[in-house]
Amino acid sequence: MKFKVRSSEFACPPHKGFGRRGVRSFLIFILLLPAFCILPPVTPAGEKWSGVDESVIEKVATEHGREAREPFINTDQGDLLLFVFLLAGAVGGFVGGYYWRALVGKRGEETQIQKKNA
Amino acid sequence: MSKTEIRKVGVTLLLLTAYGLLLTAYGILLTVSDAHAMHISEGILPFNWAALWSLLAVPFVAYGLYRLRKLSAVDLSFKPLVGLMAAVVFIISCMPIPVPTAGSCSHPCGTAISGILVGPAISILVAAVALLIQALFLAHGGLSTWGANIISMGVMGSFAGFLTFKALRSMKINLAVSGFVAGLLADWATYFTTSIELASGIKGDSAFMPLFWKILIAFIPTQLPLGILEGAMTAGMIVLLYKKRPDLLIRMKVLKAEEAV
């Protein structure tokens, strides 16, 4: 297969650090995060911190005679759901990080993908 | 140690702290409640409505596959970008975020950023894959409601984000502001469509509009702040890519060459 465009042709010099504004924005985010979590709920739901599927979708559906069925593969059993969410987060995070490096990795530190593309 | 190195270490520590905080919150949320699925769950929609939404989703997903094959054949860096977007949409759309003002949890969609960067067609495909994995293994959504969830999150989210961004950019609005509004409207469009799907599916003999408004209003306390969060995330990612790889944004037609200077 012949490729018309190579990513290396368009690679720009790596960005140096996050910059002052980036760090300042991040600091504001960090400072606001705990404050945001401490705020009491204005409209408490039936079960605290339930998802909108329970507090809205399933609640309204039940009122109209529709009940949610058990999933075909039910991982919502004990700590199994915690495990699959952790696994999904880890795999998703790895894939995201891998491709992020492939896209914005420094020229001097070529990733496997960039080497393969070259 | 130079100033740059100190800054890098500081930023790394801050990132680790934030990641730790988020993980802790995430862990607590998973242990206090049974499930946090936020798409339309399995069995909620009657068969005929579920089939209709699935049929409507098919051409969009097929066109997404066609676009992916076509674009990745001519541009090697397109695949990593699609891979990155798939991971972003998957993680974001199954991550329950607590909204203190509502006392409940919901998730952003991530389809605004993917719609802007890889185009709405491929963004729909990415959302479809993410929704399928979630329905199969994470008790999140459902196989019978897969089509309805593709239409609300994939189709509406991607097109709302993409079209809003394009419209604002054509009016010479700042990149970050355009990204923010696109993310905000993509999130709200998703839940607006979910309200239509749910109301039309469960209404039975009752009137559609009052039920639709009831569902939409019930979403507001959670989705209003989450839409703002999604807007901020979308703007942040676009600005970050602009700083790191402006060439990529030019190639994806997010930016014009003269704007990247």
Image: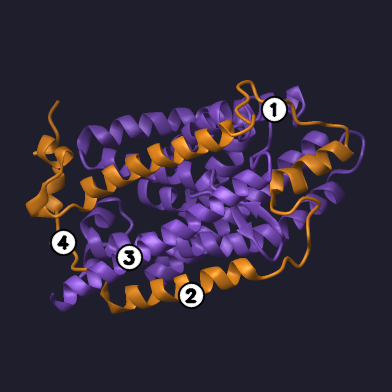
- Between tags 2 and 3, which lies in front? 3
- Between tags 2 and 4, which lies in front? 2
Image point (78%, 38%), residue name: B200
Residue A80 at x, y percent in the picture: 57, 31
Task: Identify the mark nearer the N-term, 2 or 4.
Answer: 4
Tell me which amino acid carries mark 4.
Pro
Q: Chain of mark 2?
A: A
Residue picked out by circle 1 = B50
- Between tags 1 and 3, which lies in front? 3
Q: Chain of mark 3?
A: B
Residue B246 at x, y percent in the picture: 24, 60
Mark 2 and mark 3 on one chain: no
Colour representing chain A = orange
Give the Cα distance between marks 4 and 1.
48 Å
Mark 1 and mark 3 on one chain: yes
Image point (36%, 67%), residue name: B14
Residue picked out by circle 3 = B13
